[in-house]
Amino acid sequence: MVRARARHILVSTQQECEDIKSKIQNGEEFATMAQQYSQCPSGKQGGDLGEFGPGQMVKEFDQVVFRDEVGKVHGPIWTQFGYHLIEITSRT
């Protein structure tokens, strides 16, 4: 069974998500940005969601985590919870 590990940052607006992504692309640490901006409780752990399998997250999230490139920051991705930046840290 495929497993993945990811971190994310959850915010309310697409613009805020894009602004945070720009900061990360300009050298800010993903974990620091998650602690500072994420509205998800996982933000306290740098956005770390731990390891999970397909179907454990909402569909839009799963589609990114199990299809897109590992090690890159993806997003903004809209789900029922808001806008996410997702960094896939591993997939096996």
Image: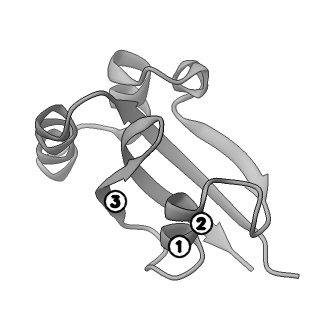
Compared across the picture, whether 50 is left or right of 23 comes to: right
Between 54 and 79, which is closer to the camera in this rendering? 79
Instruction: Give the residue drawn at x 21%, y 32%.
Output: 13
The vertical placement of 8 against 41, above or below, is: below
| Of pointers 1 and 3, the one earlier in the residue sequence | 1
Instruction: Give the residue drawn at x 14%, y 44%.
Output: 18
On the image, the x and y values in percent for residue 12 come to: 29, 27
Instruction: Give the residue drawn at x 61%, y 54%.
Output: 58
Name the residue tied to disc 1. 63
Q: Measure how far apart labels 1 and 3 are at the Cα level.
A: 14 Å
| Element under disc 2 | helix
Of discs 3 and 2, which sits in the foreground?
Answer: 2
Q: Which amino acid does the dot numbered 3 rest on?
A: Val
| Element under disc 3 | strand
Q: Are marks 3 and 2 in contact (CB under 8 Å)?
A: no
**Within-10-Å neighbours for mark 3: few <14, some 14–19, many 20+:** some
Across the whole image, how many numbered discs are drawn on residues? Answer: 3
Q: Quadrant of residue 19?
A: top left
**Within-10-Å neighbours for mark 1: few <14, some 14–19, many 20+:** few
Image quarter of the C terminus: bottom right
| Of pointers 3 and 2, the one earlier in the residue sequence | 2
Q: Measure how far apart labels 3 and 2 are at the Cα level.
A: 14 Å
Compared across the picture, whether 58 is left or right of 8 comes to: right
On the image, the x and y values in percent for residue 76 come to: 27, 52
Q: Are marks 2 and 1 in contact (CB under 8 Å)?
A: yes
Name the residue tied to disc 3. 73
On the image, the x and y values in percent for residue 84 come to: 38, 45
Q: Residue furthest front?
A: 80
Name the residue tied to disc 2. 62
Q: Quadrant of residue 6?
A: bottom right
Q: Which amino acid does the dot numbered 1 rest on?
A: Gln
